[in-house]
Image (cartoon, rainbow, N blue to C red):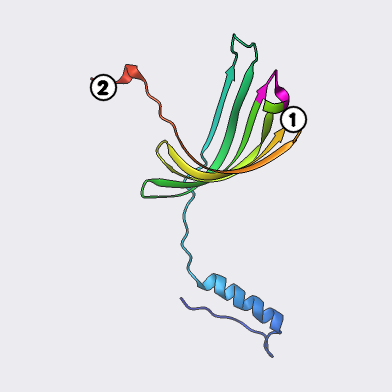
Amino acid sequence: MKFVVFMPKGGLPMKDFRIWIIVLFLVGIPLPSWAIEGFSGSIWGTAIYETTDSNPKTLGSIRQGVDWFKRYDLTFSTYGQLRYRFERNEAQFFNAYGPSVGMAVRHGSLRLGWEHQWDRLTGPDKTNKTSQIFFDWWYGWDLKNLKR
């Protein structure tokens, strides 16, 4: 690859020269590029009403991410998530909601990653920041569709 640079008579001032060097550096180096594999997302939730304590609860999350690339059947992704949990009784200590960000490596229904959460509590401490390393899995089936 050949570059032709036009310079004014008398050269460039030092500031302009540095800008040209940066531009030539960025244009002149071939960088690998990958197409984004996908924009994976999920939603999860549950509502619970136990007849023994009459205390309804709900918890869940909604997640949206970017699958950056796939290598060797592994998908590398980052995501943002909103998590929530609410309970009618004992709300002061149980209720929380807030965003989280994370990154994960996924293979089928297995996921290994890191996540940082900012929970907004309704109790005395008000906020809680946590980081966690996780391994989770999910698998579903339908017994009606089993091969005989």
The reply to whether the magenta stretch includes residue 89 is: yes
Relative placement, left or right, of 138 versus 128 is left
- Which residue is drawn at the image coordinates 67% and 26% (left, top)? 94
Q: Which residue is mark 1?
A: 123
- Most distant residue in the top direction: 51
Amino acid type, label 1: Gly
* Quarter of the view holding residue 141: top left
Residue extent of the magenta highlight: 86-92
Where's residue 72, x and y in %? 36, 49
Q: Is residue 14 above or below residue 87?
A: below
* Image quarter hosting the C terminus: top left
Callout 2: 10 Å neighbours few (<14), some, many (20+)?
A: few
Q: CA distance from mark 1 to mark 2?
A: 52 Å
Q: Is residue 125 above or below residue 10?
A: above
* Quarter of the view holding residue 11: bottom right
Where disc 2 sits, the SS reads loop
Q: Which residue is mark 2?
A: 147
In this orientation, which residue lies closer to the viewer: 91 or 38? 91
- Most distant residue in the bottom direction: 10
Which numbered disc covers residue 88?
A: none
Where's residue 21, x and y in %? 60, 78
- Which residue is drawn at the image coordinates 54% and 80% (left, top)? 4
Amino acid type, label 2: Lys
Relative placement, left or right, of 135 versus 72 is right
- Which residue is drawn at the image coordinates 33% and 16% (left, top)? 144
The reply to whether the magenta stretch includes residue 76 is: no
